[in-house]
Image: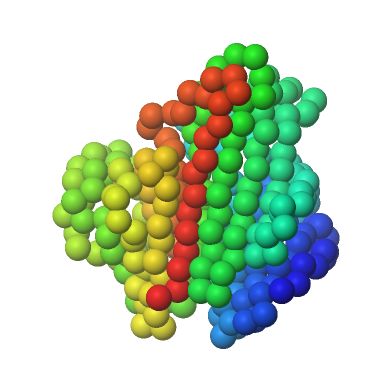
Amino acid sequence: MSLQELDFHGQPALRLALSDGSACTVALHGAQVLSWTTADGTERLYLSPEAHFDGRSAIRGGVPVCWPQFNQRGPLPKHGFVRNVAWHAEASGGKPDTLVLSLHDNEATRAIWPHAFHAKLVVTLAPHSLRVALGIDNTGGGPWPFAAALHTYLRVDDIAQATLQGLQGANRWDAVRDDRHVDLAPELRFGSEFDSVYAAPARPLHLVQPSGTLEIAQSASCTETVVWNPGPELSAKLADLPDDGWRHMLCVEAARIDEQVLLTPGGSWQGWQQLTVL
Ligand SMILES: O=P(O)(O)OC[C@H]1O[C@@H](O)[C@H](O)[C@@H](O)[C@@H]1O
């Protein structure tokens, strides 16, 4: 087990490694997990080779934390502001397999969103799994609502050969077509822009590829699962993604969107996503 501070493309980051050889790297900027490798050396997360590491922009890849707003559903910057600011490393309370990052409201956050909060991201590494948990405390004097998402970019060998299973029967809002329906497909395949918000099923999803299967579980407090792949046209338009980036990634996000959380003073909320290599 080892914990190392490092410079990752000019950004301060922490790297946690287990004795079996698995490791994860988390940037303080956005408390963003940027890499997760299992003992066999396989990278499980997608990080764009054209991502911006300027200490302001959201980093394209890994696990961006979207809070307190999802996407453009509100007046705040897209996906909220915590992915655009530096968090702090905290002691992990004697848990050597865990990284803890923390963000308290400050002058800069209150200029964007006038509320007192403490956000905590707890990243727990095990030989075949990675768990990312977002905790939110209301440290102010009044209640406020929020949405949230752990916007995970999963690395895929070839999107044409990947399927996502477990969403059959789930209510879906297809954002590309602005269409609501129950998804009847036994498995999802990808080839063009895919952007949908699903009512999260109770059971984990499976990302199935010829090289193996990844199980994706999330807390019941995350009531939606977002599935996003930009496809070739949007990929070509996104400055921080290579034109063929869409072939190597699939975002499967543990989210809380439609019914926002209303957190009262002193109240706490937690949401998590767990990835397990089967
Ligand atoms: O480019 P951003 O701000 O990181 O957002 C990426 C995507 O994030 C997804 O969660 C949304 O469903 C998409 O609509 C959005 O395009």
Nearer the observer, 275 or 252: 275
Instruction: Give the left or right position of residue 264, taking residue 202 as reference.
Output: right
Colour approach in the figure: rainbow
- The percent coordinates of residue 167 (x first, y second) are 26, 55
Q: Is residue 29 above or below residue 248?
A: above
Q: Looking at the image, can residue 46 be seen?
A: no
- The percent coordinates of residue 160 (x first, y second) are 36, 73
Q: Looking at the image, can residue 182 be seen?
A: yes
Q: Is residue 170 above or below residue 125?
A: above
Q: Quadrant of the C terminus?
A: bottom left
- The percent coordinates of residue 59 (x first, y second) are 66, 54
Q: Which residue shows up at 27% across the image and 60% down it? A: 166
Q: Quadrant of residue 37?
A: bottom right
Q: Which residue shows up at 76% across the image and 52% down it? A: 91
Q: Quadrant of the N terminus?
A: bottom right
Nearer the observer, 253 or 192: 253
Q: Is residue 215 above or below residue 266?
A: below
- The percent coordinates of residue 118 (x first, y second) are 67, 33
Instruction: Give the left or right position of residue 241, taking residue 190 as reference.
Output: right
Q: Which residue shows up at 60% across the image and 60% down it? A: 124
